[in-house]
Image: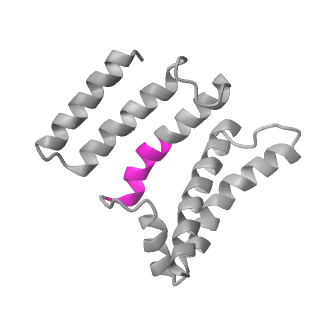
Amino acid sequence: MKTSEIGQALIEIDSKVRVGAEASELCVMINTLRIQVSRDPICELTGDPEFDQMLADCISTMSSKGKEYTIGSQDRLANFRRVGEQVDEPMEKVWFTYFYKHYSAVVAYIKNGCKVQSNEPIQSRIMDCIVYLLLFHKMSQEIERSRK
């Protein structure tokens, strides 16, 4: 992505802010710009194209799946809170249940001689683990803040 294209995208975001665009619309625009920049070989994140692609895919997954799970809320942890309330468990236990499914698939892959047991590629399971760990990072920060 050329610098001029980045500048143009930022001008467009700024103009949306000035007319009072919805925060969710602005977030989508900013995340789209981030993904485009991170997928550009000129804009290296780690110096390793495979890592850069995986991180870009993680951002894209968080953006798309996040909308499904937050159901209109800006709170990335909303789904964990809702489910926790429904089953009378703290959100971190709910998180672990979801995370463990993907982690177990990675463990099974390793134990099975690095052969996939399902129709979902192992790279997808690894990406899901990364995304869930990022969510847990956010969750743990919130838990630590509440203890102060």
* Residue 93 against residue 126 in the figure, above or below: below
Looking at the image, residue 88 sits to the left or right of residue 120; the answer is left
Q: Main secondary structure of the magenta part?
A: helix
Q: Quadrant of residue 8?
A: top left
Which residue occupies the foreground of this view, 46 or 22?
A: 46
Magenta segment range?
61-71
Residue 16 in sight: yes
Looking at the image, residue 126 sits to the left or right of residue 131; the answer is right
Q: Quadrant of residue 19?
A: top left
**Where residue 9 appears, x then y in whole percent?**
28, 27
Specify the quadrant that holds the N terminus. Answer: top left
**Where residue 2 appears, x then y in whole percent?**
40, 15
**Where residue 101 appears, x then y in whole percent?**
67, 57
Specify the quadrant that holds the C terminus. Answer: bottom right
Which residue occupies the foreground of this view, 52 or 102?
A: 52
Residue drawn at point x = 57 percent, y = 74 percent? 144
The total number of labels drawn is: 0
**Where residue 95 appears, x then y in whole percent?**
58, 66
Coloring basis for residues: one colour
Which residue occupies the foreground of this view, 146 or 53?
A: 146
Residue drawn at point x = 64 percent, y = 39 percent? 120
Looking at the image, residue 2 sits to the left or right of residue 17; the answer is right
* Residue 21 against residue 88 in the figure, above or below: above
- The reply to whether the magenta stretch includes residue 68 is yes
Residue drawn at point x = 45 percent, y = 80 percent? 85
Which residue reaches farthest left? 19
